[in-house]
Amino acid sequence: AFFSTVDTNIARQYSRDELLRKSDRELADMCKVDAFIASGPGGQHRNRNYTAVRVTLKIIPELVAEDTVSRSQKQNLAAALQKLRIR
């Protein structure tokens, strides 16, 4: 079940379908968004800036998604939100 680890009052407040229909901006407002420096291959182009993004849904802290593929923080945020919707 999608809300198995969440207080039933919160589960009643947000249905799974409601969360999936939210825009990226609305969903991002419901998340804790962390930017960090990605590690791994890519050398000098990869490790300079805080472009990697991790999003954690505030009402379900176990739901976490991150993306480090792009050199753009905005693109990584959009990709991480999409991954969050899939989970």
Image: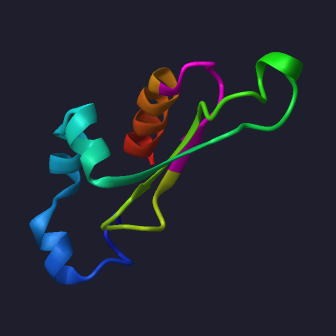
Number of numbered markers? 0
**Residue 63 locus on image (x, y percent):** 46, 59
Q: Position of residue 53 (x, y in %)?
A: 55, 39
Q: Residue at x 48, y 29 (%)?
A: 79
The residues colored magenta run 65-73
Q: Is residue 28 above or below residue 42?
A: below
82 vs 44, left or right, is left
For residue 51, what is the image quadrant?
A: top right
Q: What residue is drawn where x is 25% and y is 48%? A: 29
Residue placed most toward the observer, 50 or 31: 50
Q: In the displayed structure, does residue 79 sit left or right of residue 38? A: left
Direction from residue 62 to residue 25 in the image, left or right: left
Q: Is residue 34 magenta?
A: no
Quadrant the N terminus occupies: bottom left
Q: Nearer the viewer, residue 1 or 67?
A: 67
Quadrant of residue 48 in the image? top right
Residue 76 in picture, x, y percent from top left: 52, 28
Residue at 50% x, 55% y: name it: 64
Q: Is residue 79 left or right of residue 41?
A: left
Q: Residue furthest left?
A: 13
Q: How is the image coloured?
A: rainbow
Above or below 2: residue 18 = above
> Where residue 75 sits: x, y (%)?
48, 21
Seen from the viewer's position, the closer of residues 87 and 26 is: 26
Q: Is residue 78 above or below residue 32?
A: above
Picture residue at 16% right of the left edge, 58% below the top:
15
